[in-house]
Amino acid sequence: MTNFSRTLLALGFGVIGFAQVATSEVTEPNSLLEAESLYSELVSEPVYGETAIELLEQLETKHYASIEIDDNFSSLLFDKYLDALDGSKLYFLAEDVQKIARYRYTLDNSLSSGNVEPGFEIYNLYHKRVIERLIYAINRIENAVPEMDFTVEEYLLLDREDEPFAATEEELNEIWRKRIKNSVLSLRLTGDDEEEIVEKLSKRYRNQLSQVLKTNGKDVFQAYLSNVAATVDPHTSYFSPRDSENFNMGLSLSLQGIGAQLTTEDEYTKVVELIKGGPAERANELQEGDRIIGIGQGVDGEIQDVVGMRLDDVVAQIRGEKDTVVRLSVIPVDAVSESSARTISITRDTVKLEDQSAKKEVIELSYADQDYKIGVISLPTFYFDFEAAARGDEDFKSSTRDVRNLLEELKEEEVDAVVVDLRNDGGGSLSEANQLVGLFIDTGPTVQIRYSGLRNGFTRSFGDSDPEVVYDGPLAVLVNRTSASASEIFAGAIQDYQRGIVLGGQTFGKGTVQEIIPMSFGQVKLTRSKFYRISGESTQHRGVLPDITFPDFYDAYDDIGESSLDGALPWDTVRPVEFRTYHPVQAFLPKLRELHEARAAESPDFQYMIDQIERTRQLRERELLPLNEEIVKADRERVRRVEFDAENLRRKLKGLELKEWVEEEDLYSDEVARAVDSDSSSTEESAENQEIAIKEDSESSASAATIAEADGDEEAEEPEETDPLLLESGRILADFINLSNGDLSARY
């Protein structure tokens, strides 16, 4: 197998930046807030300018495309940075934009000379405006809710991207007045009274302000340089040292720490979950819900107070080298004050992040008078622990290793076919994609790479040289619109070799290869080359088209996929390489499609999904959200009824028990309210996020179903339904087995 080192094909490993500590007065209800006293200027450090020079050098000399840092680049960067900060036009005034516009054609010169001050000046103005807006929101929530009139017919504009910046503060206040009114209305419709609404929204906005006030210069630097990198292409990124650690950890699926997932709640660091098998769980002293108020290093290090500290700073103190000790001062979950705090010691170790590891299941189905066992392997990402492999660790994390083991287990269970489920797999390691194909073929090329720079125009093929085939039986690959990069290499190779059938939706269309290049301060993920299928076709923009198409919920969204990203590289082709096919898949496809389409036309699940996609598309096309309570109620009721009827029709056709309709006034009463209480926070957040707000109605049927179940007999719990797309994948594989008479050894 060819080793591609740290070469990545990833749609994106999210690195979350958390913002920082504020005074306790910020979160105190009804405390007086003034922007001038809360705002403080964020300043740069000399290393930031030095890093900017180094980043530009990397972009100009190593990027796949020819990059010129000139006035045009500066203008593109200005627009991208402005859009990243305030794309919805909710903070800056028109005069603010005019003020910072003097940098439109000079950012390139500043960066080239190691000056990041313009980026800081723009961010500082934005930072101040955010503080002002949040204070406005808090004051309005805490003082103006009683006077809000929900009988007036007015509307909130959902998408402000193409709107001009507000000309005056009064105009901006009007925009925010409607946003806040929408938040209040959303809670009114859940049954909250005025006092509860004020309490919830005040707490929410005060917590947001507290987090905003924790922003520091490192955050600004990361935000600015990440936009500098993304101006070149959407998959080139800069990571500061701390974000580099998070990125590498996500790719390797491991970290060295205690194995606890943390969050911030009321200025405390709270334990959300203990990772199974991690040091914290093994020590059996830390519990979910515990609040960490202090951290000490080593067996006798002084405990440092961390109340109100940024979450990422707390995490940085808890992480550390394997076999070292960290001491935590903890308020137990069942205690109410810091007087109950106790100190515990945990020895750090390597923690495996298993949630993203490959997993398997077996689906049993009866079809065409026969019983079939279909093995399903779900792979959320193509992971590889580079550092552990370099150290010579024998048990380093690798998606190929894990899938190999799962395939062996499935063979022992005597499955009739295998589905590799790559839905929502955004990519990862290029070498893993190459090696994973090798589990299903003997030898041959799997991908072509076209390089840039000194090797411009040079294309090289990589492949599998190991003749061992781990699994040679019937195979399908299930993909959707968010299957990207390494997923597309794997699916494309399986399709080109006719080794299996590709099912699902059109993939993302990311055909570029990134490499991690260390820098003096952080690292850059840089687009170095493009990959092509062995057929010579690029997946860039177009993705991999499935052999048989399934309904894909992402079809309702026109802003998902490489073709929707600004600055994406173009589609092209290279010469194909020689390869042979394994099975006559193409010959069988017309009949397989015919059989599938006949089933899909009669399938309640498929028809429900198709209709749901169309309903979602219509909701997303809405431009205005009403703020009149009766109009909103009627609209929500209409959408809820449509969704309810559609779900019950699906259930009726499948012979399942029908749901019972719950009237609007009964939705949030007594035990029913408790049954949906866990969904209330997401509902509230949806009201705040204008792009998500319109999804509330489309999701209301799910809440209605939950409510109806809560009213029923708890003991009459029905079994969970199997994913209809996996079931249909199994039926298609059964058709394939029957059409080939079980003889899949012939090669063409």
Image (cartoon, rainbow, N blue to C red):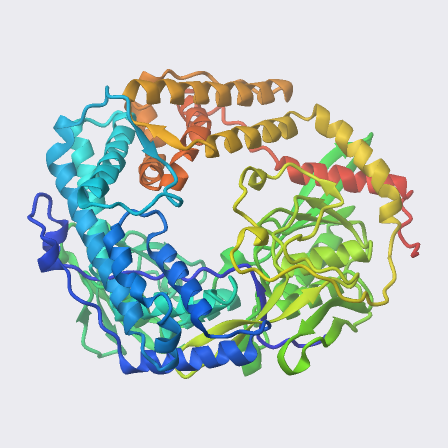
Question: Residue drawn at (64%, 36%), measured in percent from left and top?
Answer: 551
Say if 475 sits above or below 53 in the image: above
Find residue 339 and report its image quarter: bottom left
Residue 268 visible within the image: no
Q: How many marks?
A: 0
390 with respect to 699 (left or right): right
Residue 456 pos. (x, y %) = 67, 77
**Residue at the left extreme?**
32
Height in image: 400 above or below 638? below
Q: Is 680 or 303 nearer to us in this picture?
A: 680
Q: Position of residue 545 (x, y in %)?
A: 71, 48
Classify 594 as above or below 634: below
Please indicate whether residue 681 sits to the left or right of residue 428 in the image.
left
Question: Left or right of 629: which side holds 572?
Answer: right
Where, quadrant-wise, is the C terminus in this rendering? bottom right
Residue 433 in view: yes
Seen at 39% across and 80% down, the residue is 112
Position in image of residue 614 (x %, y %): 56, 30
Say which of 341 and 171 sits in front.
171
**Viewport quadrant of the N terminus:** bottom right
Residue depicted at 55% across the width and 21% down the height: 646
Task: Find residue 343 and report its horizontal and vertical position in percent.
Answer: 21, 66
Q: Is residue 630 above or below residue 134?
A: above
